[in-house]
């Protein structure tokens, strides 16, 4: 989508000009958007490893298991890579104990709670707003072309 689209325009594209949603409908919409955002982030994070996989010449089975990345693990690493937050800063901002974040980063805990995931996502959105704007544009573009 080459033209600049405001967030209000994206909502109008997805919901129509005057959306009136019940709370349960809003929850379903959030889940659907969350699903699409996770898919896009997975593609982005997987692309970081594609050259490595090509160099190592993984078998198809090995490549599939490598592609099963842990989104929260990658999001925390991405936040750290910006140098805007240290692990202690992430812990303070999200109010998630540093030990839990460490477990997520090293892969000991692959199933964070929804509340923890939400806090980490919110921080990542604040650190990488342009990334999420592009993802939302892509979702809206795909929605408009599908319907």
Image (tube, rainbow, N blue to C red):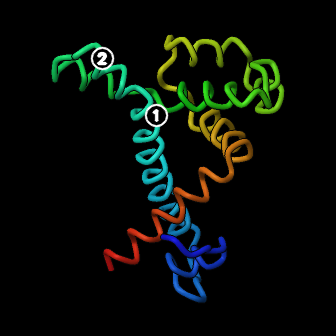
Q: Where residue 17 appears, x then y in whole percent?
A: 58, 88
Return the residue nearer the eye: 83 or 76: 83
Label 2 crowd bin: few (<14), some (14–19), many (20+), radius 10 Å: few
Name which residue lies at 40% across and 41% down.
43
Return the residue nearer the eye: 73 or 103: 73
What kind of element bears circle 2? helix
What kind of element bears circle 1? helix
Q: Where residue 70 appears, x then y in whole percent?
A: 45, 27
Return the residue nearer the eye: 35 or 2: 2
Name which residue lies at 64% across and 33% down.
116
Name which residue lies at 67% across and 26% down.
81
Q: Is residue 26 above or below residue 129?
A: below
Label 1 crowd bin: few (<14), some (14–19), many (20+), radius 10 Å: some
Q: Which quadrant of the view contains residue 85?
A: top right
Name which residue lies at 77% across and 23% down.
91
Q: Which quadrant of the view contains residue 23?
A: bottom right
Q: How many marks?
A: 2
Is 19 displayed left or right of 96 in the figure? left
Q: Where residue 88 appears, x then y in whole percent?
A: 80, 18
Q: Which quadrant of the view contains residue 93?
A: top right
- In the picture of the structure, the residue carrying the numbered disc 2 is 55
- In the picture of the structure, the residue carrying the numbered disc 1 is 45
Q: Which mark is residue 81?
A: none
Is 57 displayed left or right of 120 in the figure? left
Please identify, in this view, whether the residue under mark 2 or under mark 1 is nearer the observer: 2
Q: Disc 2 vs disc 1: Cβ atoms closer than 8 Å? A: no
Q: Where residue 96 appears, x then y in whole percent?
A: 73, 25
Q: Is residue 6 above or below residue 75?
A: below
Q: CA distance from mark 2 to mark 1?
A: 17 Å
Q: Earlier in the sequence, mark 2 or mark 1?
A: 1
Is 99 displayed left or right of 91 in the figure? left
């Amino acid at each position: 989508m080459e033209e600049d689209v405001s967030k209000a325009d994206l909502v109008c594209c997805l919901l129509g000009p005057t959306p009136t949603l019940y709370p349960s409908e809003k929850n379903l919409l959030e889940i659907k958007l969350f699903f699409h955002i996770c898919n896009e982030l997975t593609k982005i994070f997987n692309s970081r490893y594609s050259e490595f996989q090509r160099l190592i010449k993984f078998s198809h089975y090995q490549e599939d298991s490598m592609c099963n990345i842990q989104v929260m693990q990658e999001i925390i690493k991405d936040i750290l890579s910006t140098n805007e937050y240290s692990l202690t800063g992430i812990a303070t901002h999200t109010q998630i104990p540093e030990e839990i974040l460490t477990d997520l980063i090293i892969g000991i805990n692959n199933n964070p709670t929804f509340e923890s995931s939400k806090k980490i996502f919110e921080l990542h959105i604040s650190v990488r707003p342009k990334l999420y704007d592009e993802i939302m544009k892509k979702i809206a573009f795909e929605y408009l072309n599908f319907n």
